[in-house]
Image: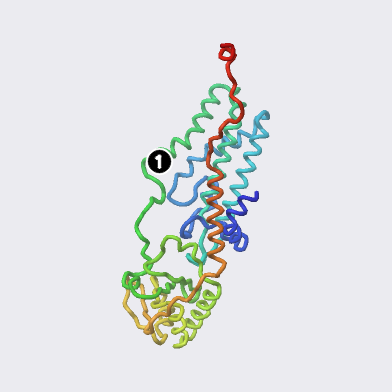
């Protein structure tokens, strides 16, 4: 128990201080789209396998509860399955936010949904010894139904691939001419009536590791307060405050008319066209301020200590060849000779 706590200390501390981040998968936080029906049928979202592929598994998992000889193990598998189902269902009802993504992200529930389906499959497998006593017709029918999910899924993936194929193209968040400007871009979305979502984009958009580089709470509060004043009654002071935070442009990809009117009325902002219909771009007259944020003094010390501990753990986990010690037994024939 001590080793995981030491090696995963910073990660565990972040999750303890911000429990909602347990929904955050590796990489940039992209929203999920699973519904309650999708979760029950073992789907993590739209565009995946047809839901009827898993209907047979659900029926067999319920039937697996009947044989008394294997019921204890099947009950345990069902407990794990219900745990996964419960977590996945909660994930369809909540949202979370991170420093690198939008304000409200619907979790991707692929992991708990996989646990739900995997545990049901385990329950079916545990009931196999008891099912061998069934009549041949019933046993053959159960085997055919059990093979529908793996065989149909394999054929589906070979034919159509996964729901979201891998892509190595860079996600274009801001126009190219804004990415080449010095400073960051403030991206606005939403409406004045329903709420405005904002985020600051560095350069052309997301880069490797950005999801872990969260801004400080002080700078976030300052930016939020400044943006509220800017959208309520803009002044030169508010625009200069944005420049001091390193922002050189404001970009609204799907601009709300009222949002456009309020931002456009701010002084020291120049309209700079757009890259697509319905989008609006404003650039700052003043030069953006330099980033003066510095990491705490303890940060490199803790990081170096974590690296050393991981290296020690890896070295200690490597397989070693042990030499035998002590006297070597001599055959009796050689002693007699």
Q: Nearer the viewer, residue 196 or 41?
A: 196
User: Foreground: 308 or 274?
Assistant: 308
Q: Residue pushed farthest front?
A: 337
Measured along the vertical axis of the image, is residue 266 above or below residue 181?
below
Q: Which residue lies at the image location 65% right of the left edge and 32% below the top edge?
A: 66
For residue 280, above or below residue 207: below
User: Whole-percent x and y of residue 47?
Assistant: 42, 50
Instruction: Provide residue 146's location: percent of width, then percent of height.
Output: 51, 33
The colour scheme applied to this rendered structure is rainbow
Location of the C terminus by quadrant is top right
- Residue drawn at (50%, 75%) of the image: 193
> Residue visible at 38% across and 45% down?
161
Residue 7 percent coordinates (x, y)? 58, 53
| Element marked by disc 1 | helix
Would you call the spot at circle 1 few (<14 residues within 10 Å), some (14-19), or many (20 or more)?
A: some
Q: Quadrant of residue 132?
A: top right
Instruction: Count up the numbered dots.
Output: 1
Residue under label 1: 156
The answer to which quarter of the image holds residue 129 is top right
Residue 1 to residue 323: above or below: below
Image x and y of residue 97, in percent: 53, 64
Give the residue displayed 65% in from the left and 39% down from the top: 76
């Amino acid at each position: 128990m001590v080793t995981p706590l030491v090696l995963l200390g910073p990660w565990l501390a972040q999750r303890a201080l911000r429990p909602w981040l347990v929904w955050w998968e590796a990489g940039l936080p992209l929203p999920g789209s699973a519904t309650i029906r999708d979760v029950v049928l073992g789907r993590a979202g739209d565009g995946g396998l047809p839901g009827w592929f898993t209907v047979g598994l659900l029926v067999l998992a319920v039937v697996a509860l009947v044989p008394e000889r294997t019921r204890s193990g099947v009950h345990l598998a069902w407990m794990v399955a219900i745990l996964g189902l419960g977590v996945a269902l909660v994930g369809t009802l909540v949202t979370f936010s991170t420093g690198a993504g939008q304000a409200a992200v619907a979790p991707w529930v692929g992991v708990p949904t996989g646990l739900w389906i995997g545990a049901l499959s385990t329950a079916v497998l545990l009931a196999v010894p008891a099912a061998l006593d069934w009549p041949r017709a019933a046993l053959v029918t159960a085997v055919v139904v059990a093979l529908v999910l793996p065989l149909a899924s394999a054929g589906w993936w070979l034919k159509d691939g996964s729901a979201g194929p891998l892509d190595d193209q860079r996600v274009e968040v801001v126009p190219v001419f804004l990415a080449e400007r010095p400073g960051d871009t403030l991206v606005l979305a939403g409406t004045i009536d329903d709420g405005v979502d904002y985020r600051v984009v560095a350069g052309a958009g997301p880069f490797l590791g950005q999801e872990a580089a969260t801004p400080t709470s002080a700078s976030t509060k300052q930016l939020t307060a400044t943006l509220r004043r800017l959208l309520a009654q803009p002044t030169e002071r508010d625009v200069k405050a944005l420049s001091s935070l390193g922002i050189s442009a404001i970009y609204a990809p799907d601009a709300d008319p009222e949002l456009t009117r309020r931002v456009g009325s701010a002084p020291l902002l120049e309209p700079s066209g757009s890259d697509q219909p319905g989008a609006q771009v404003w650039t700052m007259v003043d030069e953006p301020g330099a980033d003066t944020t510095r990491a705490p003094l303890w940060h490199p010390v803790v990081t170096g200590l974590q690296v050393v501990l991981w290296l020690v753990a890896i070295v200690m986990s490597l397989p070693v060849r042990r030499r035998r010690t002590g006297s070597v037994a001599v055959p009796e024939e050689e002693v007699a000779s």
